[in-house]
Amino acid sequence: MNKKWILPTFYILFLMLPIYGLLSMSFKTTNEILGGFSFFPQQFTLDNYVKIFTDPTWYNGYINSLIYVVINTVISVAVALPAAYAFSRYRFLGDKHLFFWLLTNRMAPPAVFALPFFQLYSAIELFDTHIAVALAHCLFNIPLAVWILEGFMSGIPKELDETAYLDGYSFWRFFVRIFIPTIAAGIGVAAFFCFMYSWVELLLAKTLTSVNAKPIAATMTRTASTSGYELGLLAAAGSLTIVPGAIVIYFVRNYIAKGFALGRV
């Protein structure tokens, strides 16, 4: 009997334990969580989820997060597409140095840029807006998207471009109708990583917002009350933050696998 599946199965179950623990805690009261460890809720309750879906402070946090994350993803991919094409198809003075410099932005910690962004957005009255956070996250996500897309584009033969020009296609007609569909997998991978990095980033999102655009990650850091931290509520909020990422992964799962196969992801 083939037992090769046993070790991978136990490994996957081990990786899923923290997620199961979070889900289990979300159906418990804070007193039960503090009272001791248990695999299953002893006093099953939906109060934590009811509060999230009925309290504007909580559900607006998810709406705000989704708004600026989607804006950032669209801007990052739209800007990265022509930039990646330039790096992929043309050679110019300092191109490799510029490409490396873009990646260094991804390496820099967000704390370095928090204060400059705060002062800038306060001066131009963009503080506490969705576009402020979306633009701030572009500093990290555009270089990442350029790096991913350049790898996919470099795998497309240049003969495709030349054939399209011989057939009378203008550059933008060729780029939109032929080239973009060809690298659809790369766009899916880039959009996924931009979405996820923007979704989980906390420091800039918290620094650049206060009320109107405050994300769910910032709301989760304010669960303290006179009786202590509301752990059950925090667990429920954390469980719901997994949902958008899981949905995105479902739709781009094949693209991500292709990205790993090409060696760029």
Image (cartoon, helix red, strand yellow):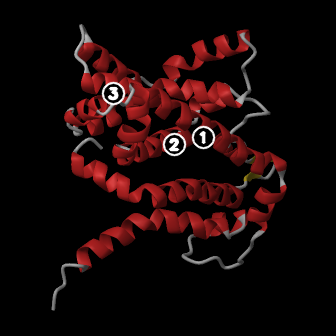
- Kindly identify the residue that appears in the image at 39 percent across and 45 percent down: 181
Q: Residues within 10 Å of mark 3 (few under 14, many from 20)?
A: some
Q: From the viewer's perspective, tell me whether residue 251 is left or right of residue 28.
A: left
Q: Earlier in the sequence, mark 2 or mark 1?
A: 1
- Residue closest to the far bottom: 1
In the picture of the structure, the residue carrying the numbered disc 2 is 195
The answer to which of 156 and 48 lies nearer the viewer is 156
In this rendering, is residue 207 above or below 47?
A: above
Q: Residues within 10 Å of mark 2 (few under 14, many from 20)?
A: many
Q: Amino acid at mark 1?
A: Val
Q: From the viewer's perspective, tell me whether residue 142 is left or right of residue 153.
A: right
Q: Amino acid at mark 3?
A: Tyr
In the picture of the structure, the residue carrying the numbered disc 1 is 70
Q: Amino acid at mark 2?
A: Phe
Question: Are circles 2 and 1 on residues that touch, CB within 8 Å?
Answer: yes
- Kindly identify the residue that appears in the image at 71 percent across and 78 percent down: 43
The answer to whether one can see residue 107 in this image is no
Tell me the distance, in whole angstroms, between the alpha carbons under discs 2 and 1: 7 Å
Element on which disc 2 rests: helix
Question: Are circles 3 and 1 on residues that touch, CB within 8 Å?
Answer: no
Q: Quadrant of the C terminus?
A: top left
In this rendering, is residue 62 above or below 179?
A: below
Mark 3 or 1: the one toward you: 3
Q: From the viewer's perspective, tell me whether residue 128 is left or right of residue 18.
A: right
In this rendering, is residue 120 above or below 203?
A: above
In the picture of the structure, the residue carrying the numbered disc 3 is 85
Q: Earlier in the sequence, mark 3 or mark 1?
A: 1
Tell me the distance, in whole angstroms, between the alpha carbons under discs 2 and 3: 21 Å
**Residue 108 appears at what percent x and percent y?**
41, 23
